[in-house]
Amino acid sequence: MAEPASPENGTTRVAVQLAPMSVPKASDVLADELRERILRGEFPEGTALPPERELVTQTGMSRATVREALRILEVQGLVRIKTGRAGGAFIQRLGEESIASSVDLLIRGRNIRLAALHETREAIEPSCARLAALHRTDDDLAALDRANDSIARDGSLGEFLQANVDWHVAVAVASHNELLNGFMLALSRAIYTSTDNQGFVDSAVRQTTAQAHKSITEAIRAGDPEAAVRRMQRHVHGYAEAVMAVEDRTSIDVEA
């Protein structure tokens, strides 16, 4: 609202209100600048960034600010910090593990429901199988065979679950799609961590899993994407239904 005209000079004063302003931290500004240059490919993998002292001189920022910016980049997987005489910050390429870590943080941070994890897996994994049938190599098939051999062994529950994760991840690797690989790595870990495997995985489940995996592997080996998709859809949907049935029974028992 405008104030009355000043009797002294005839001017009108207007009451101006400003919203609180968020000023970025200097370390965030420096991390953003370095991140963009890394992602643009200005620094090849393995390149050493200038030492902290030189970065302080170049940027005019404090050593603590420079150090915090480098820690941000390290957490994001863009640099690897080495200590010692030959130490420093070295550029590293983001890989599937970085994708998996980010997805894992989202799953845990948002407390994503187990049902949602299975829905996502049913949407993604048949596509992995289709691409695997089209692009698999001899090394990919060897990895699938090793996982199948481990699943068929009469090992501990932990060994079976790890072999199961290894097989599903191997299918994603065989798709030669880095995003799908990262997503499946995170999804597989989350699903098996969230499932009451002790009360669910019995000898019948192990046998059914082993048979399904072999059938899907053969479709991938034969280069038959349609069969790979059908068999993977049937496998992951059946597994999801069985797991959720166990989860529902457990919830009812607890509430009772």
Image (spheres, grey):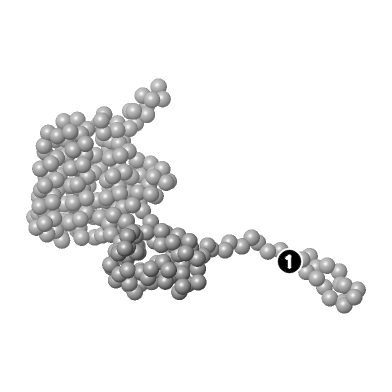
Residue 46 seen in render: yes
Residue lying furthest bottom in this view?
9
Q: Residue at x 65, y 61 (%)?
A: 19
Q: Mark 1 is on which residue type? A: Val
The image quadrant where one finds the C terminus is top left
Q: Which image quadrant: the N terminus?
A: bottom right
In the shown orientation, is residue 195 left or right of residue 8? left
Q: Position of residue 196 (x, y in %)?
A: 29, 33
Relative side of 200 to 222, left or right: right
Q: Quadrant of residue 180?
A: bottom left
Q: Position of residue 222 (x, y in %)?
A: 8, 55
Residue 65: where, in percent of width, then height? 48, 63
Q: Nearer the viewer, residue 65 or 22?
A: 65
The crowding category of the residue bearing disc 1, from other C-alpha atoms within 10 Å (few below 14, some 14 to 19, many at least 20), is few
Q: Quadrant of residue 43?
A: bottom left
**Residue 47 is drawn in which quadrant?**
bottom left
Residue drawn at 58 percent across, 61 percent down: 22
Residue for badge 1: 16
Counting from the top left corner in percent of width and height, residue 37 is at 38, 71
Q: Is residue 117 above or below residue 180?
A: above
In front of the other: 228 or 85: 85
Q: Is residue 243 above or below residue 65?
A: above
